[in-house]
Amino acid sequence: MALNLDAVGKKLGPVSKEYTWKDVVLYALGVGAGFNDLDYCYEKNLKVIPTFSIATIFDFLSHYATNANINLAGILHGEQDLIFHAPIPLDGTLTTEGKITHIYDKGAKKGALIIGESETRHSSGKKLFTSIMTLFSRFDGGFGGENAPQETFLYPDRAPDFEINETPSLDQPLLYRLSGDVFPLHVDADFAKMAGFEKPIMHGLCTYGYSCRALMQSLTPGSPDKVRRLKCRFSRPLMPGDPITIQIWKTGDEQAIWKTINTKTGEEVITNGIFEFGDIPKDEIRFDGQVAVITGAGGGLGRVYALELAKRGAKIVVNDLGSARDGSGGGSATPAQKVVDEIKAAGGEAVANYDSVSTPEGGENIVKAALEAFGKVDILINNAGILRDKSFTKMDPENWRTVLDVHLNGAYHVSRPAFKVMREKGYGRIVMTTSAAGLYGNFGQTNYSSAKMGLVGLMNAMKLEGKKYNINVNTVAPLAASRLTEDILPPELFEKMKPEFVSPLVVYLCSTKCAVTGNIYNAGMGFFNRAAVVTGPGTTIGSAEHPPAIEDIIEKHATVASLKNGKFYFELNEQVGDLINAFSAPAESTTAEAPKQTLTVADIFSAMPGSFNAAGAAGADVVFQYHISGPGGGDWNCVVQNNSCAINQGIHEKPTCTLKMSDNDFIDMIGGTLPAMKAYTSGKLKIEGDIMKSQLIEKLFRR
């Protein structure tokens, strides 16, 4: 088996993981925290140990080994570097993407180094940390590659400034592995002996967590948010129960170096430690060099958007016709110009535009103003709006048409020329302004509600056309004080609904950090949530030969109308696909269960001889025994000899190795939805006997 050198530079992920405060506490207990560190173990004033971050990306780390085709029997964690960009929240979903950056050859019998780098973001959109890790693969050297550059690391010629003593328990690996690192080297005595150790060893990352606690205790007591970087090299294994001493030398106001030694033997367990601390530099969202067009920006929400974007470096086109709330009047240059003057007084750049969004010519002119003044358009916020409220029977065609012309047609008139500019540049952010009246309905606003819901449809189509050009289109339903609502809302509520409580979300959606597209958000008074069209699982009624009768619909109406286990569709084709697939399922199905697997374990073993790669079997003399549990399982063995393959049902007397797995997991692994490495590291695949020979399977059989 050879390393896959082509894996270098290829994107890995995204891989997402949800976690809660209980995962945070479990990790803290796994790295030795307890009543002396109650803030890390009790939800009352809970804080997150920064090295918890590495536990959240275990599923991602397996991709390095899988893609590099590392020999698992010789894999060790060599080095780890964590760089923190923001404190770790107590819960949420983390998404990690990365790549293998280097594969170094230390020489035959000396091993190889695989360097992987990843970035992890929280579901809030914040980038939390960068991980740079080195995997040491003891059995994969000698392929003729470049050796890793040498590093020099010196400790001060003086006693440490701090020494912290800890004694992990004999059972520490059993607790730590519950955070996700379930590699058998740390629990399975037979595996440990096969890997060259007398018994299971401590997780290096567990000792890393102990070291982080000691560093915080000494240099950032009570403030895990001040940890900015933690780097080290794992030099020697540590046995469970052996005491450790973390030695720390402060080398600057916000820097220290450290190492961890086995107190009993004096051996250095972790070396080359770097610790940086202090206030994490603010990861501020900036718009320097970008151009934003904001319609209806002469007051209210639009004005606040314009001022905030300008403060963060954007050049602004402030569009406002300056008409009355209902769109009447000849317009005025005053509102737009006042906002421009405010921006310039604060040191920003802006120009005013007074065209109406309600005509194609007006939309073209607004975008033209941006191109003439600043040369491009990066951001468009469709914010212009008017109100002409009437009950439905009193809603005459003019009031209907005028409101749609400003809200819905206006967004089309401006977005179309702006989209063309963004498409040419390969970048853009567009924000539509809908309303709760459109999403949920409001008495006396049939024109306004229709226009606002129409904007959601416009977004849904534009998000698909813009995706390949890096143009994100999202929609906000703001609840904020403006000239449209000043005499509708009670005065005390009006005061609480400042536009400043809405603008942070809109500004985020305009930024390069925003990766989402096609989302709808409610925002007001500091409360934010996502809205979406959700489709219930439904049921099939009737058949191709027998269309349903009205009575059948009535009988099944409760199931048809149920939104339990509802689903969000990103585009039309997803919904149509589910509709078509529904007719291949039992007609009485009323739940959103996952499709049943049609492939069986017996089918897989029947097909194995046909997928055998005889050319890759030269010199192979192995017996793979499979024990597949579950109702669809059984025992099969695969005998590979003399460039041939024989599949037999039953148990072989002398298997080279035995693979144990459940029937569903085995089918998923063979089908490609469960990577073999992930199956192994998660404990779904157990291998007994010669684990190194088991890695021949991927070489001997084609999927």
Image: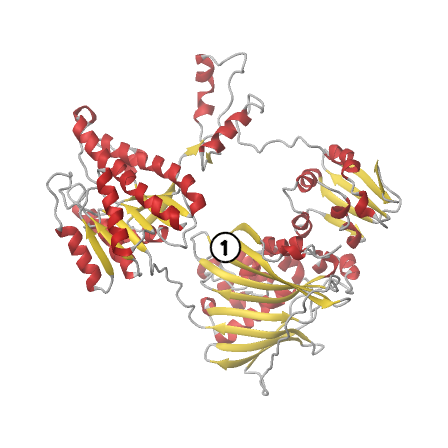
The residue where tag 1 is placed is 21
What residue is rendered at 26% in x and 36% in y?
409
Front-most of 200 and 401?
401
Q: Residues within 10 Å of mark 1 (few under 14, many from 20)?
A: some
Residue 171 visible at all = yes
Left or right of 665 on screen, residue 84: left
Q: Nearer the viewer, residue 342 or 234?
A: 342
In the rendered image, residue 38, in percent from the top left (x then y), is placed at 50, 64
- Whether residue 165 appears in this view of the structure is no
Residue 192 sits above or below residue 594 on the image: below
Which quarter of the figure is the C terminus placed in? top right
Q: Quadrant of residue 476?
A: top left
x and y percentages locating residue 47 in the rendered image:
47, 62
Q: Is residue 395 above or below residue 504?
A: above
Quadrant of image for the N terminus = bottom right
Q: Quadrant of residue 520?
A: top left
Residue at x 39%, y 36% (from the top left corner): 461
Give x and y (percent) for residue 170: 69, 65
